[in-house]
Image (tube, grey):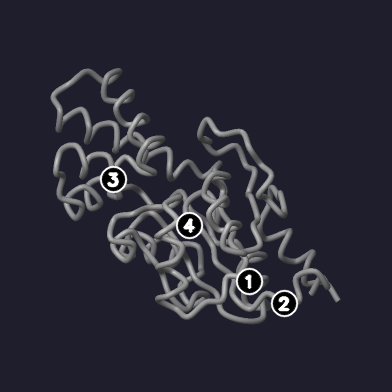
Amino acid sequence: MLPELAHIRNWIFDLDNTLYPVSANLFAMIDARIGEYVRNLLNCSPEEAHRIQKGYFHAHGTTLSGLIAEHGVDPEHYLADVHDVDMGVLERNEALIEALARLPGRKLVFTNGDAPYAGKVLERLGLGESFEAIHDIHATDYRPKPDPLAYRGLCDAYGLDPEQSLFVDDMARNLKPARAIGMTTVWIDNGSEQGPDEDRSFIDYKVSDLGRWLHEILED
């Protein structure tokens, strides 16, 4: 282990576009279904649905949080609908499977999606047994990343010391609250859609390939 990471006891990972490459286009399919959900709910044009969808995403953290706040949407119905996508686009990543198995300490998934969907993704990637737990949108009481309460809730739920924790996410803005409570932060810079905030001062490591980076820090 790199000396500067020897203190890490808890390895926390985002799911979408982090544990699989953005090129798989799985989240692009989900994004399209979210737009369709908004369009059907509000009976508006595709263009207006897209504007509302992205507006809620940037203002509330997720489109779901905006729909709950503004329209009282049932989260269970929404999540089942937008996550009804073809998992066949995902492939096993042997390098990532091996690297995660070698990591010392606890490993958790922290996602704005829900656990049933996350479980399917992990199984498809060959990572079904790689993580201790999935901390999902239900567990955060629908306060998604980057809401600071979501990170505190994660640490409280599993007894995590933020100073001994490392968090990996493809959304740069989701790393800011993690760094604020003492976590080491890793940004997967892979072309994922980002918010308007261009501040990157809270990022400790910037990587493009998670599996390769984990192998690099684990090399003897």
Q: Which residue is mark 2?
A: 7
**Mark 4 neighbour class, 10 Å CA radius: few under 14, some 14 to 19, many 20 or more:** many
Q: Secondary structure at mark 1?
A: helix
Q: Nearer the viewer, mark 1 or mark 2?
A: 1
> How many angstroms separate mark 4 from mark 1 (CA)?
22 Å
> How many angstroms separate mark 3 from mark 2 (CA)?
35 Å
Rendered residue at 58%/62% (across/down): 167
> For the residue marked with disc 2, what is the amino acid?
His
> How many angstroms separate mark 3 from mark 1 (CA)?
29 Å
What mark, if any, has residue 65 been given in the picture?
A: 3
Front residue of this view, candidates 87 and 204: 204
**Residue at the outermost right position:** 220
What mark, if any, has residue 163 been given in the picture?
A: 1
Q: Which residue is mark 4?
A: 15
Of pointers 3 and 1, the one earlier in the residue sequence = 3
Q: Nearer the viewer, mark 4 or mark 3?
A: 3
Q: Nearer the viewer, mark 3 or mark 1?
A: 1
Instruction: Please say if 72 is above or below 136.
Output: above
Rendered residue at 50%/62% (across/down): 125
Of pointers 4 and 1, the one earlier in the residue sequence = 4
**Residue 218 sits in quarter:** bottom right
Q: Secondary structure at mark 4?
A: loop
Residues at discs 4 and 1 in contact (Cβ within 8 Å): no
Residues at discs 1 and 2 in contact (Cβ within 8 Å): yes
Instruction: Please say if 103 is above or below 114.
Output: below
> For the residue marked with disc 4, what is the amino acid?
Leu
**Mark 2 neighbour class, 10 Å CA radius: few under 14, some 14 to 19, many 20 or more:** few
Residues at discs 4 and 3 in contact (Cβ within 8 Å): no
Of pointers 4 and 3, the one earlier in the residue sequence = 4
Instruction: Please say if 166 is above or below 131.
Output: above
> For the residue marked with disc 1, what is the amino acid?
Glu
> How many angstroms separate mark 2 from mark 4 (CA)?
24 Å
